[in-house]
Image (cartoon, grey):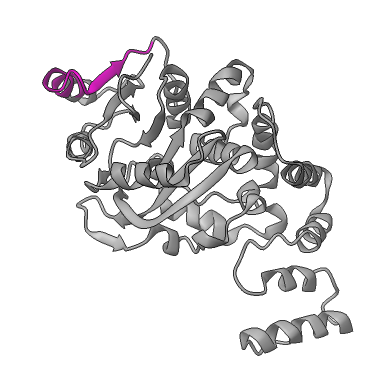
Amino acid sequence: MKNKKRLAILLATYNGGQYLKEQLDSLLAQSYKDFAIYISDDSSKDNTLEIVEEYQKNYPETIINIENTKKFGSAKGNFLNLAKSVESELYIFCDQDDVWLPNKFEELVNRYDQEKTTDVPVVVYSDSKVVDSNLNVLYESFIKYMGFKANKKNLKFRLLRNDVAGCTMLCNSKLIEAYQKVADQIDEKAIMMHDYFFVQIAAVYGQVYFVDKPLMLYRQHGNNSVGITGYKEILDNRTPEMANVDETHLQVKEVLKIQLPVEAKRKRIVNKFLTLKDKGSVGRQLFFVVNDYQFFPGFRNISVLVNLFPRNNWFRKILRGTKNLVTGQKRWN
């Protein structure tokens, strides 16, 4: 399906009637007007389709309903199908329950235009405010709440971590078209989430840019498909040697099916990363330290190295002392 506008908004819905009108109203109130909204519903049982039909009737040139003949059973499957179904210059993924600030499209498109990077896959993403079901602000910054540092991201980070929520990201045609060409070869079961998959493609083959502003209200409620609380707990509790390796290993193999040239340095990083799957806990920890995988601020890699030695080992004590001198901690063990 060819988009007549420059920007395609890909909106996946499922039983989203409670908040869908607020989301659609915030899209229609955008300062940037060269867009169309493509909606794919995954067999909703509530009034979602009634709302979609109402808005489509009122905005026939802007809202397009993509009728599906199969049930996807997940937001991931629904979004991947949308990405396969629409041809456009630019794309933004959209959840059904948030509220977007009026300048969101304009800010993301302007940043993309400023970079003048059209020949490789590109993702441009922003920060967001985290709000409750009534739009009361819980956290002023999603990025800060999650403990991410947006200016510290590189390919190594993105092989193991994803700081890009799908509803904050813009993708260019080079990225989505590259996926469309091999979509029938992609094992969707190996894809963790659509946003992480597309971010990894951009990180391996192209560029990822950040707009350091909250451009949307990221609503948290009891029915979120993916909420920030559970995601943060996973990150906080996951040890470095187990950090996404088993899951992302499979996804990265799908990323490598994209038929685009990749820089030699990035290719070496990815190929090295793929060897992690066969390493045990100690081997993974050593790999992260030797290859400078700095997931966390400060001296976390020293902590990883400390844990390789027995509790009373003299070298462990030296390493622990080095970390304590820098961080101000007083534990010696």
Residue drawn where x is 21% and y is 53% of the image: 135
Identify which residue, 52 or 182, lies in the foreground.
182
**Above or below — where is 139 with respect to 85?**
below
Q: How many marks?
A: 0
Instruction: Please state the extent of the stretch shown in magenta in the rendering.
Output: 52-68
Q: Is residue 67 magenta?
A: yes
Residue 53: percent from left, percent from top: 18, 18
Identify which residue, 178 or 333, lies in the foreground.
178
Q: Residue furthest left?
A: 58
Residue drawn where x is 30% and y is 24% of the image: 5
Identify which residue, 315 or 150, lies in the foreground.
150
Residue drawn where x is 54% and y is 20% of the image: 180
Residue 291: percent from left, percent from top: 78, 58
Q: Quadrant of the C terminus?
A: bottom right
Identify which residue, 47 or 40, lies in the foreground.
40
Residue 303: percent from left, percent from top: 72, 72
Residue 311: percent from left, percent from top: 82, 78
Residue 78 in sight from this viewpoint: yes
Residue 313 in sight from this viewpoint: no
Q: Quadrant of residue 30?
A: top left
**Above or below — where is 115 with respect to 7?**
below
